[in-house]
Image (cartoon, rainbow, N blue to C red):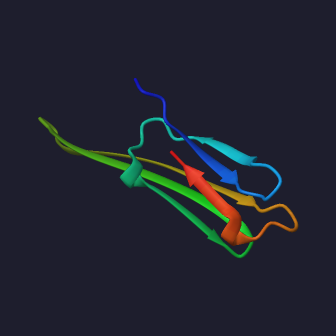
Amino acid sequence: SMQRRLNRMLDSSHDDKLLALVDVEGFVPKEITVTVKDGKVKVLAEHKEEHTTSRGKECNYKNIMKEISLPPGVSEDEVTYSL
């Protein structure tokens, strides 16, 4: 299985700084949302599967939600992330 990680990088004029690393294994990129608002970076990953079995319909759902505060002096405009 392929391991996927979401890196949120802070671009600063001096040096790139890693704010957080979030393991999102089992999620595809379209299931992951990253927002930067009110001094915080929020990562939301949601995955839903539906199967029909002999007993009826089964639904599997999993999600991850992480919220990280930006360090003092870091502008929301400076935040970048990659998958």
Can you give x and y, in whole percent of width and height, for residue 10 in the image? 72, 55
Given residues 70 and 75, the one toward you in this image is 75
Given residues 25 and 60, the one toward you in this image is 25
**Rendered view: 72 above or below 26:** below
Residue at 86%, 68% (x, y): give it: 73
The answer to whether residue 23 is left or right of residue 79 is: left
| Quarter location, residue 13 | bottom right
**Rendered view: 79 above or below 46:** below
The answer to whether residue 66 is left or right of residue 70 is: left
As drawn, which residue projects farthest toward the bottom? Answer: 38
The answer to whether residue 79 is left or right of residue 74 is: left
| Quarter location, residue 5 | top right
Given residues 47 and 20, the one toward you in this image is 20
Residue at 67%, 71% (x, y): give it: 77
Residue at 83%, 54% (x, y): give it: 14
Can you give x and y, in whole percent of width and height, for residue 26 in the image? 42, 36
**Rendered view: 71 above or below 39:** above
